[in-house]
Image: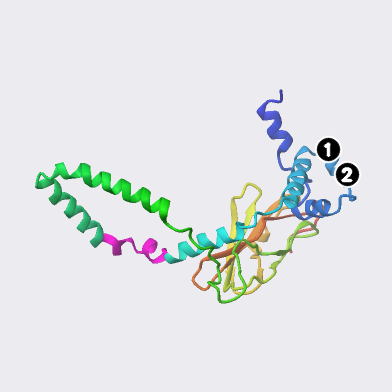
């Protein structure tokens, strides 16, 4: 049986490992081959999982479930952000319970509790099924927030450190937040923009050393700063023989 340390070494990311874009291309065209796959268990596993993911069929009500959760959170947003608004109700409830016990009315607790249990279960069993909610509230075509932002570049092995990150516009987005990370997800830099491109600072580009994998992703936000969609994590690296980031 393979021990954990051997397995970790076999599945560790190496600079020569294939990028997500390269794995995606191999998954789309099974006739394409890459010599690196023959000697890399990690890339073999990544490619197999990618093929399995793309071959899976989503459930018919998955989009509706995501939209229902989003709509429910939107309705509760004010109460979540301002819990102090519920203090009066909580204080009134506490006072009522305090008076109940002070007056020695504990003998009423048993029948009241029994009634509450019966009422709760009756409501669960008899209440009608909640209607299927849509993100557009019936005003147009359903738009489910299970989509993702499509990243364009950079990706794969590059001759030099990239200067710009680019992605496709996402419907309804008012702003985009971009994060650049090391391969272990430690943040290198992040920024925001109203456009579909963002210039990388020179100080960050200087950290993109030849052969060092770099990750990045972009998040679409609405006008209130709520997350609409997130891109897949992109991966690139500067070629080992690259001159510099200039």
User: x, y percentage for residue 51?
Assistant: 77, 48
Q: Nearer the viewer, residue 42 or 165?
A: 42
Question: Vertical placement of 21 versus 35: above or below?
Answer: below
Residue 49 at x, y percent in the picture:
73, 45
Q: Are marks 1 and 2 in contact (CB under 8 Å)?
A: yes
Residue at left 27%, top 44%? Answer: 114
- In the image, is residue 80 part of the stretch drawn in magenta? yes
Residue under label 2, please give it.
35
Judging by the rendered image, the residue that carries numbered circle 1 is 39
Q: Residue at x 59, y 76 (%)?
A: 140
- Secondary structure of the residue carrying numbered label 2: helix
Residue range of the region highlighted in magenta in the rendering? 76-87
Q: In the visual, does 102 lie left or right of 93? A: left
Q: Quadrant of residue 189?
A: bottom right
The quarter of the displayed image where residue 203 is located: bottom right
Q: Residue furthest left?
A: 103
Q: Who is closer to the viewer here, 93 or 155?
A: 93
Is 233 located above or below residue 151 in the figure? Answer: above
- Numbered disc total: 2
Disc 1 from disc 2: Cα separation: 8 Å
Principal SS element in the magenta part?
helix
Quadrant containing the N terminus is: top right
Q: Quadrant of the C terminus?
A: bottom right
Report crowding for label 1: few under 14, some 14 to 19, many 20 or more residues within 10 A (C-alpha): few
């Amino acid at each position: 049986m393979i021990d954990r340390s051997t397995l970790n070494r076999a599945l560790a990311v190496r600079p020569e490992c294939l990028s997500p874009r390269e794995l995606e291309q191999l998954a789309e065209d099974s006739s394409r081959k890459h010599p690196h796959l023959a000697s890399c268990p990690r890339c073999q596993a990544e490619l197999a999982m990618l093929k399995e993911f793309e071959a899976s069929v989503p459930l018919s009500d998955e989009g509706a479930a995501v939209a229902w959760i989003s709509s429910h959170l939107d309705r509760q947003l004010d109460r979540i952000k301002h819990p102090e608004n519920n203090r009066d109700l909580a204080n009134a409830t506490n006072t009522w319970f305090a008076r109940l016990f002070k007056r020695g009315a504990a003998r009423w607790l048993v029948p009241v509790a029994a009634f509450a249990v019966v009422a709760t279960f009756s409501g669960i069993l008899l209440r009608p099924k909640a209607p299927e909610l849509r993100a557009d509230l019936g005003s147009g075509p359903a738009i489910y927030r299970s989509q993702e932002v499509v990243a364009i570049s950079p990706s794969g092995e590059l001759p030099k450190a990239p200067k710009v990150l680019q992605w496709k516009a996402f419907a309804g987005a008012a702003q985009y937040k971009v994060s650049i990370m090391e391969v272990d997800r430690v943040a290198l830099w992040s920024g925001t923009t109203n456009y579909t491109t963002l210039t990388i600072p020179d100080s960050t580009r200087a950290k993109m050393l030849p052969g060092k994998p770099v990750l990045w992703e972009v998040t679409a936000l609405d006008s209130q700063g709520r997350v609409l969609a997130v891109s897949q994590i992109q991966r690139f690296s500067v070629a080992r023989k690259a001159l510099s980031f200039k």
